[in-house]
Image (spheres, rainbow, N blue to C red):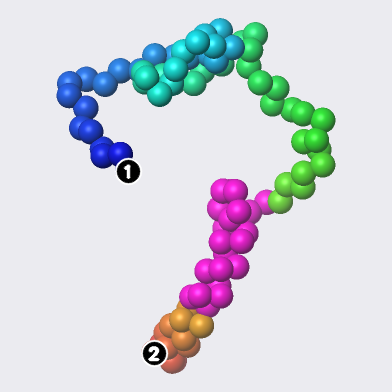
């Protein structure tokens, strides 16, 4: 297990393109991944159109968000229903 070491002084990073600097060791210095224009990865691959995109009105665009909602409903669902019923009775 590694301990967190509080940085002494100002911490600076530098931009780093893995294709331009293949010998840079990101474990030895603080670098920020920035692809230069000639080496930037393609943002539209041949399989991109095969992945369905759905609008998420709940605002959860994170990977696996739908599974998380299912688990949340399973774990907290009955509690939510109980709270709604209590609120409904209190306002009626």
**Residue drawn where x is 48% and y is 78% of the image:** 80
Of the two numbered discs 2 and 1 in the rendering, the one whose residue sits closer to the viewer: 1
Q: Which part of the image, by quadrant, shows the C terminus?
A: bottom left
Left or right of 67, for residue 48: right
Give the camera-side residue of 51 and 9: 9
Q: Position of residue 84 (x, y in %)?
A: 47, 82
Q: How many marks?
A: 2
Q: Position of residue 13 (x, y in %)?
A: 35, 18
Left or right of 53, for residue 3: left
Distance between mark 2 and mark 1 Cα atoms: 52 Å
Magenta span contains residue 60: yes
Left or right of 74, for residue 85: left
Left or right of 37, for residue 15: left
**Residue drawn where x is 77% and y is 44% of the image:** 51
Give the camera-side residue of 56 and 33: 33
Q: Which residues are magenta?
A: 55-77
Could you classify mark 1 by the number of other residues whose Cα lies within 10 Å: few (under 14), some (14-19), or many (20 or more)?
few
Of marks 2 and 1, which one's residue comes earlier in the chain? 1
Q: Is residue 88 visible?
A: no
For disc 2, the marked residue is 90
Q: Position of residue 90 (x, y in %)?
A: 39, 90
State whether residue 25 is above or below residue 21: below
- Image quadrant where residue 42 sits: top right
Give the camera-side residue of 19 and 51: 19
Q: Is residue 16 visible?
A: yes
- Image quadrant where residue 86 sits: bottom left
Magenta span contains residue 57: yes
Q: Secondary structure at mark 2?
A: helix
Could you classify mark 2 by the number of other residues whose Cα lies within 10 Å: few (under 14), some (14-19), or many (20 or more)?
few
Residue 1's disc number: 1
């Amino acid at each position: 297990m590694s301990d967190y070491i509080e940085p002494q002084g100002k911490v600076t990073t530098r931009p780093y393109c893995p294709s331009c600097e293949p010998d840079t060791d990101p474990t030895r210095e603080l670098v920020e991944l920035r692809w230069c224009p000639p080496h930037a990865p393609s943002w539209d691959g041949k399989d991109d159109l095969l992945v369905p995109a759905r609008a998420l009105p709940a605002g959860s665009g994170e990977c696996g968000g739908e599974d998380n909602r299912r688990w949340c409903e399973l774990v907290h669902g009955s509690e939510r229903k109980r709270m709604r019923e209590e609120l409904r009775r209190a306002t009626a």
